Amino acid sequence: MIKIENLAGGYKNTPIIKDLHLEIDRGEFFMLLGPNGSGKTTLFKLITGQLPIQKGKILLSGKEIASLSKLEKARKVSVLTQEVQVSFDYTVEEIISLGRYPHQKGIIKQLSKKDRKVIEDVMELTQISQYRNTQLRMVSGGEKQRVLLAKALAQEPEILLLDEPTNHLDIKHTFHMLDLIKEQQQTMGLTIFAILHDLNIASLYADRIGLLEKGRLLEVGDVDTLRNENQLKKVYEVEVKTQSHPAVPKPQILMTPQHTTKNNQYDFDSSYKIVKSNAYIHIQFDQALRTISNGVIGEGIQWLKHFCNFHVEKHYNCSDPKKDLQAWMDTYQIPHEQAVGMMTAVNLEDMVMEIKVMEGIEIMVVVTAGVGNAVDISSRYSANATSQIGTINTMVFIDAHFTDGALVNGYMSATEAKVKALQDLDIRDSESTTIATGTSTDALLLALTQQGDVTPYAGSGTPVGKGIGQLVYHATKKAVKKYLKRVQK
């Protein structure tokens, strides 16, 4: 659909774009990315004919753009930019009707029945019908961009060129506009070439991206190209981290400001306080910790400050335990948005805390344990099995810097240690009578200060993994013994 061969061009005799080759397929959403000064706008102006081509050629549907008349180009290509310049007080409907000009015939251009239907359709599509008689200057920025999008779509183009069309829009209007454009791509086969600054937005909407640097395409590929942290750092000259979007299989980029990379060490021992009662245990840190957890609240990998274990009655049963936990935290003025929350029927007086320095790394483990609902995960599941609330809740705090991989390693190390403790205590699944591997409602947290040198591994074959394992093993054994002693009274 768009083919660029050996292109060079710029301003006067200075080529900004140099020896550029690119092909964009019919029905593709292609986004051009790059820092300021990389040549994005220059390339856009070359494609739209605003700048002369110094070398090479640009083809639209196999025809050189230079060979097309203005009317032919207008029938094929529509342009939407961030700039809105309207000299007269046109109404919204009058602005949109200008998009039909390339399709009107005769010396006196008049709107046909088809033209009016197209105008009505695009106004409905972009949800601006109610502004049809309003002067363009009287509508908001977001509404104005929707009007201009409607005008562009009214042209019924094969190709839509976008130059930072969402630059001045808030999140709602940005997503609304790009959703509309994506829908036109998918339903009408519209080919889209867009320039954007926002890498994360580009990742969510583009089929392919091109990374431009100093007038040359550094790389062209699908959006997973944005997972290359070293390349992004080189091009944009900032520290970046990439991660997967939690809901769609697309990468998202996190920028790291320079001030956060400074290593401001703090004392682990004085950085937290513990509040303990019959109702709850609350461990609060001054600094947010990097966490991995399957808690009722605060699950997944996050940065959090508050770590809570709430007592519930033995026969507690609720369809929305997260809502209960949030309400309890609100009662005690604990911000649940910054917390991991667990619950247990175990008497909180039987909490076990172990603190030890292993290989220069301080580790603190807090465990509450009940095994009334102990299960062997390898045994056959019985849908009618009855159980008591038990729960082994384990919190592991470590004064170290783990990668995300090491977080998962450490999580495995803690789990293996818990299983070993239950094995050595001969805790059994009441249904299968085999050795239990845990309880049906266990919760586990690892929380890291992220101080010091980066640790890439924390499995059972590493000193820190062994340290996690040893403390969790001993704390779990002590906590289970306390529970057994209490229930046997």
Image: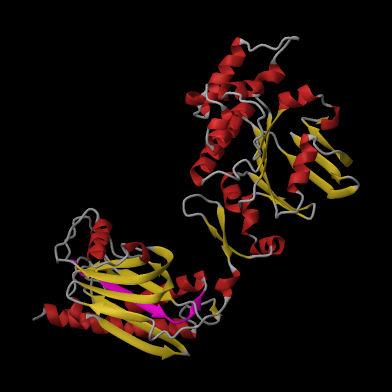
Up/down of 87 relative to 233, above or below: above
Residue extending farthest to the left is 489
Q: Which residues are magenta?
A: 389-402
Q: Is residue 260 left or right of residue 37?
A: left
Queried whether the magenta region covers residue 339, the answer comes back as: no
Q: Could you tell me which residue is drawn at 25 percent across and 78 percent down?
A: 275
Q: Position of residue 217 (x, y in %)?
A: 77, 52
Residue 292: image quadrant is: bottom left
Q: Nearer the viewer, residue 286 or 3?
A: 286
Magenta: main secondary structure equals strand
- Locate residue 224 relative to residue 331 in the image: left or right: right
Q: Identify which residue, 392 or 308, lies in the foreground.
A: 308
Residue at x-position 54% and y-position 60%: 243
Q: Is residue 132 above or below residue 460?
A: above
Quadrant hosting residue 342 = bottom left
Q: In which quadrant will I find the N terminus?
A: top right
**Quick one: 78 or 144, which is closer to the camera?**
144
